[in-house]
Image: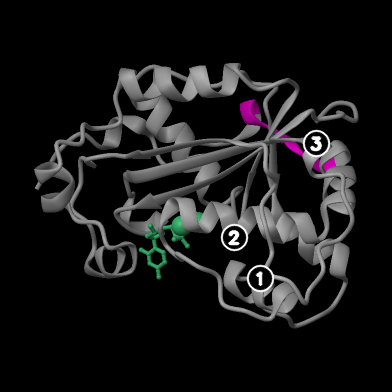
């Protein structure tokens, strides 16, 4: 970003998809949890107690009937399928979903920083592709923080895994709950963030990227068919 930003709200997000970037995936589930910086400024959690998210947060979870077939692997790990999403009457990622997303973000005190684990390589570019597909976008000065390189840089320890579940294990000595559900992964990310919140918020104020600089994962025109 051009100058250091004192982000007021951190919006943790995770997206479940029909596959990996090489599959040019579609979103199948989106979860956002918004937390004011005030609720992130607290002592480092006590590792002998089960970690808890802050009491005050806003949450939006949407299931989406994607325009593409799931890969077998994505279906297996997410527990989602084209058939069950359709049977449950879920719509595609459409203008109504965009309105819900916008309204959710508009309710938060700004400036806002989106936070995702591996977000710069996965969640942010894919969300941008999906938004552009329906002629929508987010404000270009929205902050974007990827906790994967951020934690790596703050740790300065070589040869450690920074997969979300492994980082959670290092901080809390337990397996995360609900891996590969969007809400489960967001709560895991929020708890990981809490373990290093002061450092990560400082890091974000200097190193967060701008939404306007996020390149779409693939051109939005390339999709729009169904199996
Ligand atoms: N994904 C995949 N195969 C993997 C890991 C992930 O196809 N081995 C896809 C499907 C997931 C999405 O990436 O919905 C997001 O991953 P995660 O659940 O880790 O957020
Ligand atoms: Mg993820
Ligand atoms: Mg996930």
The answer to whether one can see residue 148 in this image is no
Label 3 to label 1: alpha-carbon separation = 21 Å
Where is residue 30 drawn, in percent x and y? 42, 42
Give the mark nearest the N terminus, 3 or 1. Answer: 3
The image quarter containing residue 149 is bottom right
Mark 3–mark 1 contact, CB under 8 Å? no
Residue drawn at x 37%, y 58% as measured from the top left: 22
Label 2 to label 1: alpha-carbon separation = 7 Å
Give the mark nearest the N terminus, 3 or 2. Answer: 3
Question: Bounds of the magenta span?
Answer: 207-212
Drawn side of residue 148 relative to residue 128, left or right: right
The image quarter containing residue 140 is top right
Where is residue 45 drawn, in percent x and y? 81, 63
Drawn side of residue 57 relative to residue 70, left or right: right
Tag on residue 188? 2
- Circle 3 Cα neighbour tier, 10 Å, few/some/many (<14 / 14–19 / ≥20): some
Which residue is disc 3 drawn over?
37
Q: Is residue 93 above or below residue 161?
A: above
Where is residue 95 drawn, in percent x and y? 32, 18
User: In what element is the residue under mark 3?
Assistant: helix
Drawn side of residue 103 relative to residue 62, left or right: right
Tag on residue 201? none
Give the mark nearest the N terminus, 2 or 1. Answer: 1
Q: Is residue 173 above or below residue 38?
A: below
Closer-to-camera residue (164/67): 164
The answer to whether one can see residue 152 in this image is yes
Which residue is disc 1 drawn over?
168
């Amino acid at each position: 970003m051009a100058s250091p930003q004192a982000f007021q709200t951190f919006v943790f997000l995770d997206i479940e998809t029909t596959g990996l970037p090489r599959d040019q995936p579609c979103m199948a589930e989106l979860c956002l949890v918004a937390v004011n910086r005030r609720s992130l400024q607290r002592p480092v959690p006590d590792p002998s107690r089960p970690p808890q998210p802050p009491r005050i947060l806003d949450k939006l979870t949407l299931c989406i009937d994607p325009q593409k077939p799931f890969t077998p692997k994505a279906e297996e790990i997410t527990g989602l399928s084209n058939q069950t999403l359709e049977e449950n009457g879920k719509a595609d990622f459409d203008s109504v979903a965009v309105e819900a997303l916008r309204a959710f973000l508009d309710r938060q005190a700004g400036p806002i920083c989106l936070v995702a684990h591996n977000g710069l390589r996965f969640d942010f570019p894919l969300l941008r592709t999906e938004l552009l597909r329906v002629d929508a976008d987010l404000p270009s000065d929205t902050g974007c923080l990827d906790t994967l390189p951020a934690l790596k840089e703050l740790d300065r320890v070589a040869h450690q895994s920074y997969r979300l579940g492994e980082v959670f294990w290092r901080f809390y000595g337990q397996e995360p709950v609900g891996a590969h559900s969007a809400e489960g992964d967001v709560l895991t990310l929020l708890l990981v963030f809490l373990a290093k919140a002061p450092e990560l918020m400082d890091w974000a104020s200097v190193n967060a990227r701008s939404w306007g600089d996020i390149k779409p994962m693939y051109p939005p025109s390339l999709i729009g068919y169904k199996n």
